[in-house]
Image: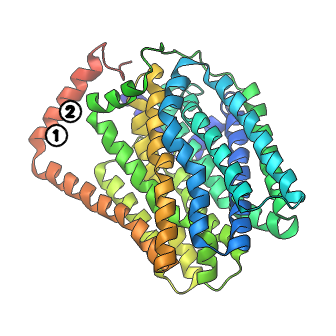
Amino acid sequence: MAESAAENDRVAGPRSVWRIVRRRDFGPYFLGNALSASGTWFQNLAAALLIYRLTHSALLLGVLNFSQFIPILVLTPWAGGLADRVDRRKLLFVFQSLAVVLAAGLAALAWGGLAGTWVVIGDTLCLGVVSAFSAPAQQALIVSLVRRDEVPTAVALNSMTFNLARALGPAGAALSVHYLGIPASFALNAASYGIFIAALVVVRPRRQEKATREESRVRDSFRLLREKPELAAFLLIVAIVGFGSDPVNTLSPAFAHAYGRPDTWAGFIVGAFGAGAVTAALVVAGRVAGSRWRMAATLFLLGAGVAAFSVCPWLPLGFALLFVGGFGYLASNTAATTRLQLGVAEQQRGRIMALWSLAFLGLRPFASLLDGAIARTWSVRAAGVVLATPALAAALGVTASALRRRRDPLPRAAASAASASSAGSPRSPGAR
């Protein structure tokens, strides 16, 4: 274990990224997932712009995002159990194929002038169902494509995938909408799902240890949290990170208008946040999850960056603040997600990542509705500050916890001894 950590430290950073991306069983997945995630941003931005142009309603932007994430809140616990019972790659193949049909169908309707407000919201709701069943399997599959000592790097790269898409996808989507139009942007998303399906055909994950139907019941997902309370703490951090980043995703067209720019600048606003996240992925790749001090610092960067962007009057400085917030977002999320991935056994990973999806994606409908409601009642800038506040509060809470541990080292030593004893027990889910 110590040797693995030492090796990771020696090849940390961009070298660690390059080492894993070259792998035959991870490289195609990484590339396909990155392109698919970028295509999703084409879909999201095009849908948001279409809704905003049709209605000029910040509230309906919140409803649009609500429809994207509410299926995750409702269906993910069952999806996690399914991901532990059946072959995860085959499960992804089925639902990604369905996503191709939904995205291509919306493109055809938009070309025919039939994509009204509620058609777009309905299609987004159906894609949310696909995401609900795909997310736990997709997250859990990552671990089976790399060695155990490479899991932190793989998790960072997976986060980098989505945030590389966050950096490049919205800007590309803005150009696509401007030059090709909204229907073509929907069609490009459909093509990106097809690329990810091709990657799933190529990779060869390790043989999956499957749970029985009795072992993968929904209530057993929450039993994991009772048995290991630290997992609940990491899930809370994941949820807070999701709330902190939501104003950038949901209200980017409205933020563009607040800065006196056309709504297509929404892509560049989201892209600046994503650029910070990609930078963080390169920094944390190959390193084990950090201390409480590091977690407090990265949560502070997220909250302060988003809040300061929301009140900043000058867009170039706002881009820099978004970069800072994106860095804190990725670093915080990667550290918490790595601890979750390694904190359970293989046949439990689908369920814990279902809870991850619930925390990170499933609660986002409420963040989106809150964003839209605050923006409508007060202003889009007020919405950004309010949603960034939990990250700042969490940074203070983690700092206080770290100070308590520094003042009283005895409980820390006892916890370390208990952890070592648990690791040596054959009943421990994390035992090797």
Q: Nearer the viewer, residue 254 or 300?
A: 254
Dot 2: element: helix
x, y (%) of residue 396? 26, 62
| Residue corresponding to mark 1 | 412
Q: Is residue 290 left or right of residue 77?
A: left
Residue at x 63% of width, y 81% of height: 257
Residue at x 54% of width, y 24% of height: 82
| Residue corresponding to mark 2 | 416
Alpha carbon of mark 2 to alpha carbon of mark 1: how far? 6 Å
In the rendered view, would you say 237 is above or below 297?
above
In the rendered view, would you say 391 is above or below 35?
below
x, y (%) of residue 32? 73, 40
Q: Are marks 2 and 1 in contact (CB under 8 Å)?
A: yes
Q: Is residue 244 visible?
A: yes
In the rendered view, would you say 238 is above or below 52?
above
Instruction: Bin the neighbour count of mark 1 within 10 Å (Cα to Cα): few under 14, some 14-19, many 20 and up.
Output: few
- Three-letter code for the amino acid on which mark 1 is drawn: Arg
